[in-house]
Image (cartoon, rainbow, N blue to C red):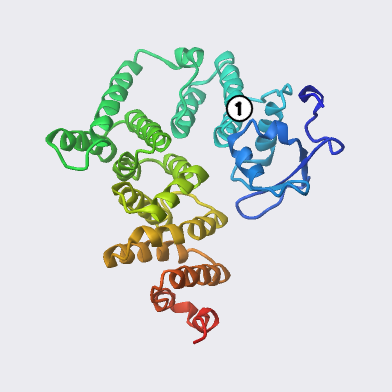
Amino acid sequence: MENAQLRFGCPTSADVKLWLMGPNEEKYERNPVHLHSVILERSEFFEVKLSDQSSNKLPEITVITSHGFHDYLKCIQLMYGERVNFSNVEECLAILSVASELLVDDCINKCMQYLEAVRWTAEQKTQMREVLSSLGLEASADLAARLHTEDDEHIIFVERMVTEMVSLIQGHHQVTKNRKIAEEYITGILEGNSSREVVEVCGRVLLREFKSCIGSGNFLGMRSLSKFIQYCKGEILEAAFRAFVEDPELTKHIKELAWETYQQCCEDAFYTIIWFMEATGEGKMNISRASRISFLITWLPIMTKLCFGELLKFAEFEKAVLNIVESLLLVDKERICAVWAKVYNDYNIDIATPFTLFKDLLDAHDKYTPKQ
């Protein structure tokens, strides 16, 4: 069947069922949404989801999203090539956020085309800048031209300077004079009395370079930049979290490195993920309950291996895990406790440690401790 004949939501030709849920587990009233894999595969996000499906049955994908269901589905309609009328700038920005998360360049471009073609208020112009900054997106040429004013000259200069300072930070383990100057410059922006615009452009550069490090496998760069990203707004943190923690290829790569042999990049990866665990546990970003559980289950075995038997690393690791676990329900704690015990057993580590730390789960000790 030609792609042009595929219609959004058509149950007779669809080969994928999408179940949409909100962050508080509320369900979309029209679930399931009938879609087509050939269309969804235009999104890197859905491509990964589909690759995890069994080939002998109709794929069913469940997505927990903090975006509005209406905005989420409009973005998918854009993927189908359907004509989507944006109600206003605010709706377009909401759909742009979905497109950025789903990694669909065509939808991002269509949103940019709308934004550069309509009238804005001063408040909407500010909102556009904030959204583009938080998503780490570069405006299209026409949109950038409209957003630009004489006051932006200083911002452009700051962006160039931050980019140069970041390049000095992410390439060296040792603290050189130039690196120290670069760190003080960026810290001064993020912790000082800089204007909101300057802080935002600094955060945008940090996120862009952090993603670039992920793409190139530069673990030292990721570790170096993560400590500065913590000073940015929640949106920047969440984008960095998704880029690092939820990237299946990166997770697989780190796992392979940890299982093969010790390398300096393994230590850089360890301390980067420790930072994300601490940021999650301290509530510096809005991560859903389901994402927190998935985060721990995915990374517990990898982080255990990355500790390489070093007691200080284990102490940091366990403390970081506990900060997240304390935010979960009792049933979730029991689940994490079981996974943790199994991982520790696999590596012949004393499993009493997790249970001692979970003081409200003492009864789980007998349940999950292997019988002698």
Left or right relative to 306: residue 55: right
Image coords of residue 10 (percent x, y): 83, 35
> Quadrant of the rendered structure where residue 133 is?
top left
Residue sitting nearer the eye, 45 or 161: 45
**Residue that protrudes farthest toward the front in the picture:** 260
Asked if residue 20 can be seen in this view, the reply is no
Residue sitting nearer the eye, 244 or 20: 244
Residue sitting nearer the eye, 51 or 12: 51
As displayed, is residue 356 above or below residue 172?
below
Residue topped by disc 1: 92
Q: Residue at x 12, y 35 (%)?
A: 177
As displayed, is residue 109 above or below residue 196?
above
Quarter of the image for the N terminus: give it: top right
Image coords of residue 282 (percent x, y): 39, 57
**Residue that protrudes farthest toward the left in the picture:** 177
Q: Residue at x 54, y 72 (%)?
A: 334
Image coords of residue 36 (percent x, y): 75, 35
Crowd rating for badge 1 (residues with CA inside 10 Å; few <14, some 14–19, many 20+): many
Q: Residue at x 34, y 42 (%)?
A: 219
Image coords of residue 92 (percent x, y): 60, 27
Residue sitting nearer the eye, 276 or 189: 276
Amino acid type, mark 1: Cys
Q: Residue at x 46, y 44 (%)?
A: 250
